[in-house]
Image (spheres, rainbow, N blue to C red):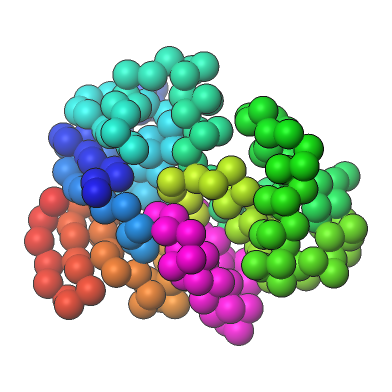
Amino acid sequence: MELVVAQDVGKDYQAGDIIVKALKKINFTLASGAFTAFVGPSGSGKTTLLNLIGCLDKPTEGKLTVAGVDVSTLDRKQSAIFRGKNIGFIFQDFNLIPVLTVYENIEYPLLMVQNVPPAEREKRVMALLAAVGMTEQKGKYPDQISGGQKQRVAIARALVINPKLVLADEPTANLDHKTAKLVIELMKKMRDELKTTFIFSTHDPKVVGEAETIFTLEDGDLETRNMNGGKKNA
């Protein structure tokens, strides 16, 4: 099943009198359950593309379909509702709320974007705490846990809404080698168990090495490499 389809998707930004083409009519398709990496130098368009897929921004041209919905046509309110139901986010700096406990950080999306009864919230949060190995730390605050533990909490928070898609922007950038490897293995385990699609924007060769499909972005253009090493322009 096709989960993300980009058809001639372009994104322009105005910089004074200059129009910057962050993405240049790119085309690609991602199947449900994919473990995919977008790579490329800084300024290549990786974060721009994740923002478009995540309904945080809109393309200047083309059509972008996510989970069967043309998200390029959604208004701000519709985009927020769609994100809340379908998309989880993982960031390089974790983005945990410092005044909330581990448990409360994971529960937060259910309180903000979904009308989930308390018993169901507790069931989901406790299940994910166990899945990411953080049950014993559920009452701690973000400044009381390590970077790797913070990213585990961020993964659980992204998954608590049962998303079709998780977007991860440099999720291992602030982790040491050993911890980054463990976090990648955890995300693959979650993908295999929950059938969630993961899309990464990354420079990390450890993430790239685990990806089944690699998209290389440079100056807004896209090239694809599948796991057997073949290349083609998108």
Q: Can residue 191 be seen in this view?
A: yes
In the image, is residue 95 above or below residue 76? below
Q: Nearer the viewer, residue 166 or 42?
A: 166
x, y percentage for residue 173? 56, 66
The number of numbered discs placed on residues in the rendered structure image is 0
Q: Is residue 136 left or right of residue 77?
A: right
Identify the residue at horizontal 78%, vertical 38% (top origin).
118
Residue 27 relative to residue 199: left or right: left
Residue visible at 29% across and 69% down in the picture? 212
Q: Where is residue 180 in the image (x, y as percent from the top left)?
A: 57, 75
Residue sitting farthest toward the bottom:
178
- Residue lying at 49% horizontally and 54% vertically, measured from the top left: 168
Query: Where does residue 58 sit, x and y in percent of width and height?
Result: 37, 26
Instruction: Work out whether 136 lies above or below 141.
Output: below
Q: Is 172 one of the magenta-colored residues?
A: yes
Residue at the image position 47 percent from the left and 29 percent from the top: 82
Relative to residue 98, is residue 230 drawn left or right? left
The reply to whether residue 147 is in sight is no
Whether 139 is among the magenta residues is no
Q: Give the range drawn in magenta.
A: 169-198
